[in-house]
């Protein structure tokens, strides 16, 4: 699991957390989403620290990277490097299909996009093979 996956998944985890489901599955989701949220918070701290480093400002002060600036290019490159790092969050010990089956039939708030974002977090996910380039 990469930090980038964590960073882009928080809205989908929040949405899943608001869905009515069976209590046992809901508890598993609750505990796991807290771990994802904590990891997201660490990425956000790194992102803010990076902005302060690039702009040479003190933490706690306002810092902004201007569009089109050299600072923006450096920020994008360095933040993308952070997002490519491995996360300490392991896959949840739950199949995505079990989570979907546990959702109240009347609840239709999860979208295909949400499920696509959440899929790599579940233990039945199989990483697609990378295309071989020679």
Image: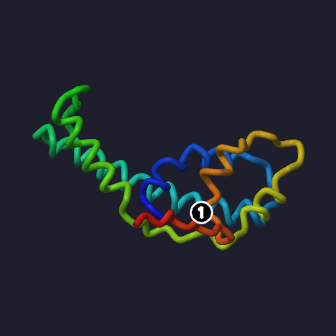
Quadrant into which the C terminus falls: bottom left
User: Local crowd at mark 1 within 10 Å, few (<14), some, or many (≥20)?
Assistant: many
Picture residue at 32% right of the left edge, 50% below the top = 45
Q: How many labels, in total? A: 1
In depth, the one of 61 and 56 nearer the eye is 56
Left or right position of 23 against 43: right
The quarter of the displayed image where residue 27 is located: bottom right
The quarter of the displayed image where residue 123 is located: bottom right
Image: 34 above or below 55: below
Residue 106, horizontal then vertical, whole percent: 88, 42
Image: 24 above or below 72: below
Left or right position of 1 against 81: right
Q: Residue furthest top?
A: 67
SS under mark 1? helix
- Model colouring: rainbow
Picture residue at 15% right of the left edge, 42% below the top = 54
Picture residue at 58% right of the left edge, 65% below the top = 128
User: On the image, numbered disc 1 is attached to which residue?
Assistant: 121
In depth, the one of 111 and 73 nearer the eye is 73
Left or right position of 127 against 51: right
Left or right position of 6 against 69: right
Image: 31 above or below 41: below
In depth, the one of 126 and 133 nearer the eye is 133
Picture residue at 43% right of the left edge, 54% below the top = 4
Residue 18, horizontal then vertical, whole percent: 70, 45
């Amino acid at each position: 699991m990469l930090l980038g996956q964590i960073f882009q998944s928080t809205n989908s985890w929040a949405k899943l957390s608001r869905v009515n489901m069976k209590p046992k599955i809901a508890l598993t989701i609750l505990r796991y989403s807290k771990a994802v949220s904590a990891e997201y918070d660490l990425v956000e701290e790194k992102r803010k620290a990076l902005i302060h480093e690039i702009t040479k400002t003190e933490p706690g002060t306002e810092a902004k990277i201007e569009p089109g600036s050299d600072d923006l290019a450096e920020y994008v490159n360095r933040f993308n490097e952070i997002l490519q790092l491995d996360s300490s969050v392991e896959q949840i010990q739950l199949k995505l299909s079990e989570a979907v089956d546990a959702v109240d039939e009347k609840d239709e708030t999860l979208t295909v996009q949400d499920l696509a974002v959440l899929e790599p977090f579940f233990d039945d996910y199989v990483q697609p093979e990378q295309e071989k380039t020679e």
